Amino acid sequence: MSETVRTVSIVDAVYNAIRDRILSGELDPSEVLVEQKTAELYGVARPTAKAAIDRLVHQGLLRRTANKSARVPALTVSDVRDIYFTRTAIESTVVVHLAERHLPLAAADAALEAFDRAAQAGATKGVVDADIAFHQSLVDAVGSPRMRRIYASIIGEAHLCMVLKQTHHLHSPQELAKEHRAIYEAIIAGDAELARASLVAHLDNSVRSIEHHFIEAADA
């Protein structure tokens, strides 16, 4: 039996390597990525390093101002509130749409199973990856290319928030798994209002936990 192997381009490989370093916390907030040094680090041409960095900037995992090198975002309370405000606006529309139309959610179901396994194992990266996969699967299930593009523009920063929650133990994986399953079950039941309320409560909990962390860090 043959197996399909996914070919990864050099740009993809550099992108994945930098992304993993950002999301693991190896690259500290505000750390600068210079294109030439990045190219030398990974043994690639500068245009390759630039393409990988540009993709990370587009996703919000890096930020770049005019004529400046890209750097890892140092999120503020204001950033977090705006990220979750935007997510709530998009995702509440998504869950209502899915609940009202009874669209298939096989990918969301798979993400929940991965979430449960990661939560039981205490695997931080697995929890974060399953969290992202669940929310992304709901957006994808709508079937709107434009909605997907809009969501892609904020999911990188949302990912940083999720990593922050897990690395600082702001929200237990078990509780997160329960919150995600409540959203899923309300959608499956066709209860649009409950699905929206469950999603909003979940996102509000995340905002409050991160805000509290920033306050405690400032007072320390």
Image (cartoon, rainbow, N blue to C red):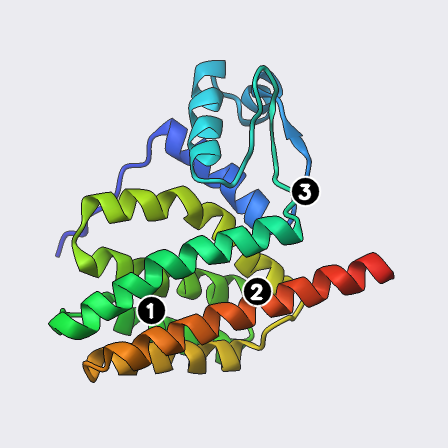
Three-letter amino acid code of the residue under disc 1:
Ala
Q: Is residue 183 above or below residue 136?
A: below
Residue on which the image places disc 1? 111
* Three-letter residue code for mark 2: Val
Q: Nearer the viewer, mark 3 or mark 2?
A: 2
Q: Secondary structure at mark 3?
A: loop
| Quadrant assignment for the N terminus | bottom left
Q: Which residue is mark 2?
A: 207
Asked whether residue 101 appears in the rendered view, the answer is: yes
Would residue 123 be seen by someone viewing this image from the given angle? Answer: no
Question: Quick one: label 1 or label 2, which is nearer the N terminus?
Answer: 1
List x then y, in percent, for residue 71.
62, 32
Residue 68 lies, in percent from the top left, at 61, 19
In the image, residue 154 sits, relative to residue 12, either above or below, namely below
Distance, label 1 to label 2, CA atoms, is: 22 Å
Q: Position of residue 135 (x, y in %)?
A: 35, 62
The three-letter code of the residue at mark 3 reads Pro
Separation of marks 3 and 2 at Cα, in angstroms: 19 Å
Q: Are marks 3 and 2 in contact (CB under 8 Å)?
A: no
Q: Is residue 199 left or right of residue 123?
A: left
User: Would you say the residues marked 1 and 2 are in contact, meaning their CB atoms lie under 8 Å apart?
Assistant: no
Q: Nearer the viewer, residue 2 or 80?
A: 80
Within 10 Å of disc 2 (Cα), the crowding (few <14, some 14-19, many 20+) is: many
- Determine which residue is flagged by label 3: 29
Look at the picture and state if 73 lies above or below 100.
above
Badge 3 or badge 2: first in the primary sequence: 3
Please tell me which residue is depicted at 66% across the width and 29% down the height of the picture. 32
The residue sitting at 61% across, 40% down in the picture is: 73
Point out the tag, 3 or 1, that comes first from the N-terminus.
3
Q: Picture quarter containing residue 66?
A: top right
